[in-house]
Image (spheres, helix red, strand yellow):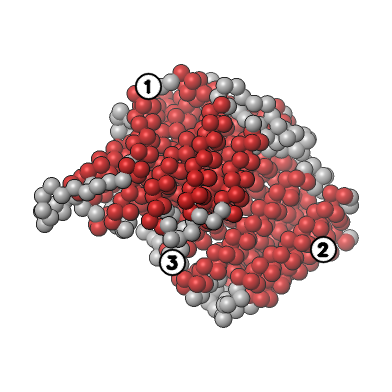
Amino acid sequence: MGLELALILIVFLGVVILGSSRLGTMIQLFAAQSLVLSATPLLVHPGKHAVVMAFVTVVLKVFLMPNLLFWAIRHVSIRREVQPLVGYGKTLMLGGFLIGTAFFISSKLDLPVEETSNLLIPCAFSIIMIGFLLLVSRLKAITQVIGYLVMENGIFLFALLLLEKTPLLMEMGILLDIFVGVLIMGIVINHINEEFESTNTIHLTTLRD
Amino acid sequence: MLFILILLPLLSGVFAFLLSKNQQRKMVLLGTSFIHLIGVLSLWKSLPVAQLNGFLGMDVLGRLILTIISILFTTVSFYLWGYLKDEDNHSNRIFMAGLLIFLSAMTLVTMSRHMGLLWIAIEATTLFSAPLINFYRTPQSVEATWKYLLICSAGIALALLGTLFLAVAASKGETVFLDVLLNNASSLAIPWLKLSVIFLFVGYGTKMGLAPMHTWLPDAHSEAPSPVSALLSGALLNCAFLGILRVLQICAAAGQAAFARDLFLIMGLLSLVIAAIFVVGQSDYKRMFAYSSVENMGILAIGMGLGGIGLYGSLFHMINNAFAKGMVFLVTGNLYQIYQSKKISDIKGLLHYYPVTGIFLAIGFLAVTGVPPFGTFYSELMILNAAIQSGRYWVAFFYVLFLAVIFIGIAEGVLKMLHGGTKEQTANQTNQEDIRLIMPILFLGLIVLILGLYMPSFLDDALRESSKLLGGR
């Protein structure tokens, strides 16, 4: 029961991120989504492994990464997505459609492993697709990073299916990689700011054939 | 031994970061890469046993790719010694540290015996090569770095999902150790395996620069400092290729090789088409050679897709291409230092003013496009042979057609740079060229030439054994 509530909350937060335009709000929503996410390992397989996972997720995804993203946009004056590639109404519609697709695909999949909840797989796919949608439909560098992170959150959910079998070392390595990735992306966003005086990737168009 | 090869560049990278002078950091780079090379060559005596609970290990395929990486890296370190002299007022702290950690990550890729660890290592190569591309911090290089980071990270995220699907497919087994997967391949759940293969292909294919996920590659290769371009195309792309080969290896063991081969063929031919379209009439010489990398990755994929002798040919082409492309990008480094421009139209009469660089540009061009007697010619011929032997005449036809178009496209650009523009200038005015920027190019050129003339028996054995791992005979 608790797990299902958490899963639905995570998808809900994903949809809210999709519909929001302010960068600060998006980062906070991502942090909130990650906070709910960090509880899921404990709900799936309570144990030492899950406690470590939850702790590291809270430290990295709820505290460090959002603060890093806030640091990256500290000099940005326009803190909202001005002109998204696809309008908000359309992205939300598309998001709803993708969630439907995720549920449809999941119902067709024949899982060889034991499921803890039949909502786990469809929710994971929904979040992955919402993240991907954010990544391709927005122009602000920071929004694209949030899209990437939301996608990673979805992959994290899917990985819960294999929580017992995955070595802890691997999971820590993956989280560390993502953290270093966000760190480097934050630094590059800073450089984009200095060079273009804007974090809008629409200016990044000099390289083309 | 394996552990040392990973830790040495990592610790040197941290050490280089703490040093205060550019000159000292160059020495650390040179020393570390040289010791790394000696260590790698010592692996050829016998393969070390698996370490760290089986996470680290080395097979013939990994050793082959690690050797390419280490030779190329050492050569580039020598080249950087001469290349970076002008930028001495500009701190190379992050650049050098990034370079060494990048080497460590690539070493880890070749030694991973666990699909999750492989993913971590390949993602780490993306992260630590990004600061290298952004060395000059021009608006263009920032743009290229951003595209590289974002496209590759998103692609690699799909590969992570693919790895998880693979774990679901192997849920009867322990976890996704490569050796466990290979031994119990028959018990894999086939639908999940196929799903994971698609995701892993798209993910690692993005990193390898296969079309249509290649869009980051021309930008990153053209905006990075030339020695870094040489490493990206010669070493990094091969790391991603190894990731895909591991997938092929699992498919072959599970009896699903035909499925994976079709994917290889489609992506390979598409890469050739894209490269042919963008090489012809290209105005930037580094972008031109970057598209040649897309072409060569396509050739590797086609060789793997054809199977049979194509496997051997593809692995042989991987070696040839790494050194040929490394050579040609180092030549573009010389060009950029002389002219401070990447436009083909800004360079004229190279053979006249800078004869040594000019001759090496001509040689490098012949080597990358596969003209005899260079090794690339023989490996491309083997892949053509595989297409004809397996009765895929359409593949053979388009393969030859696109190679010819790309040859003409690059020839046009290179000839424009080599000739012309001599009339306005006084005759016989040649310029001094730095020997430190010539020797590494000569060395790489010699390797490609020797591989075309003579195949050492140890290499022949290594290629044969590696193609056996991938389902060949």
- Left or right side of B77 for A107: right
Closer to the camera, B53 or B38?
B38
Question: The residue under label 3 is which amino acid type?
Answer: Pro
In the current view of this chain or complex, which residue is farthest to the top? Answer: B457
Residue labelled with disc 2: A6
On what subunit does the disc labeled 1 rest? B
- The answer for how far apart the CA atoms under marks 3 and 1 are is 46 Å
Q: Relative to residue B337, is residue B106 depicted above or below?
A: above
Closer to the camera, A95 or A33?
A33
On what subunit does the disc labeled 2 rest? A
Residue shown at 41% from the left, 41% from the top: B326
* Tag 3–tag 1 contact (CB < 8 Å): no
Give the label on residue B264, or none.
none
Residue A179 in picture, x, y percent from top left: 67, 58
Q: Relative to residue B437, is residue B338 depicted above or below?
A: below
Residue labelled with disc 3: B139
Residue B68 in picture, x, y percent from top left: 49, 34
Give the label on residue B454, or none.
1
Q: Quadrant of residue A167?
A: top right
- Left or right side of A67 for B337: left
Residue B203 in picture, x, y percent from top left: 58, 48
SS for tag 2?
helix
In the current view of this chain or complex, which residue is farthest to the bottom? Answer: A77
- The answer for how far apart the CA atoms under marks 2 and 1 are is 64 Å
Residue shown at 46% from the left, 43% from the top: B77
- Residues tagged by mark 3 and mark 1 found on one chain of the structure: yes
If you read the primary sequence from the N terminus, does the residue marked by circle 3 or circle 1 appear first? 3
